[in-house]
Amino acid sequence: MVTANSTTLESIHQAAKKEFLEKGYQSASLRNIVKSVGMTTGAFYGYYNSKEELFEALVGKHYDFMMNCFQEAQRAFTELPPEQQPENLSQISGLCMFDMLHYAYEHLEEFKLILCCSQGTRFAGFIDEMVEIELKGTHDYQDVLRKLGRPSPHIDPRLEHILITGMFNAFFELIIHEMPMEEAENYLREMRTFYTAGWMKIMGQ
C-alpha cells in the first residue's frame, strides 16, 4: 500500500466495513466499495492490491492483539512454578479474558468482521486457533499435575474439544450480540467460575 490521504483512506475503510458486515467477505463487492466512495477501481489499487488486503487492513492488528494476549496468558501460566499452577488455574487466564473482552468492545465492528464475516480469509479459523492453544495448555497442565503426584483421569479428546470450543463460542457471543458491558462482565465471571469448577471436577482435583 502506498502513502495515502488519510481522509480518503478512512472513507474506504468505512465503506468496506459496511459492505463486509452486510455481506461477508466472500460476497462483498470491491466494486461497490469503490463506487460508494466515488473512486475508480484503478485509484483504489493505489491504496490496496486486493479485497483481501483491504480486509486485512481492517482487522489484522486486532486479530494479532487478541491472539498475543491469549498466548501471553498461556505462557505466563506455564512459567509459574508447578506447585503454584493449581492455585492459579483461573487467575491469569481470567484476567486475560477480561482484557480481551474490553478490547473487543472498543473495536466491535472489527471483531464482528472476524467472527461473523471472515469466511474466505485467514481469519476464519480464529476461534479454532484459540481452541488449539487452549487444548495444548490443558495437556501441559495435565503433565504438571502428573509431576505433582495428582494425575487427572483420562479425558476423551472429543469431549475436551467440545468443552473448549463451547467456552470460546460462549465468550464471543457476548461480542456478537453486543451485550451491555456490565452484563457482559458479570456473564464472563459466571462463565469462568462454571468452567473452572467443571475442569477441576473432571480432572479429579
Image (cartoon, grey):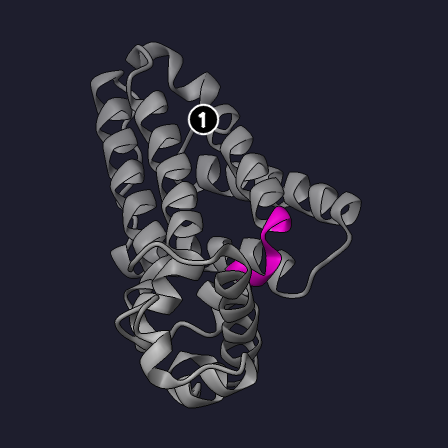
Q: Is residue 190 above or below residue 142?
A: below
Q: Which residues are magenta?
A: 105-110
User: Could you tell me if residue 168 is visible in this image?
Assistant: yes
* Residue at (26% x, 55% y) in the render: 157
| Residue 55 percent location from the top left of the image | 39, 67
Q: Quadrant of the N terminus?
A: bottom left
User: Could you tell me if residue 194 is visible in this image?
Assistant: no
Total residue callouts? 1
| Residue 190 percent location from the top left of the image | 67, 42
Q: Main secondary structure of the magenta part?
A: helix
Q: Nearer the viewer, residue 1 or 178?
A: 1
Q: Nearer the viewer, residue 31 or 80?
A: 31
- Quadrant in the rendering for residue 11: bottom right
Q: Is residue 185 above or below residue 77?
A: below
| Residue 93 percent location from the top left of the image | 47, 32
Q: Is residue 107 magenta?
A: yes
| Residue 188 percent location from the top left of the image | 64, 44
Q: Nearer the viewer, residue 135 or 104?
A: 104
* Residue at (40% x, 58% y) in the render: 4
Q: Is residue 159 above or below residue 97?
A: below
- Quadrant in the rendering for residue 142: top left
Q: Quadrant of the C terminus?
A: top left
185 with respect to 164 (left or right): right
121 with respect to 116 (left or right): left
Q: Is residue 149 magenta?
A: no
Q: Secondary structure at mark 1?
A: loop
Q: Which residue is mark 1?
A: 89
Q: Crowding at label 1, few (<14), some or many (≥20) Cα neighbours within 10 Å?
A: some
* Residue at (42% x, 89% y) in the render: 31
At label 1, the amino acid type is Leu
Q: Is residue 192 above or below residue 1?
A: above
* Residue at (36% x, 46% y) in the render: 64
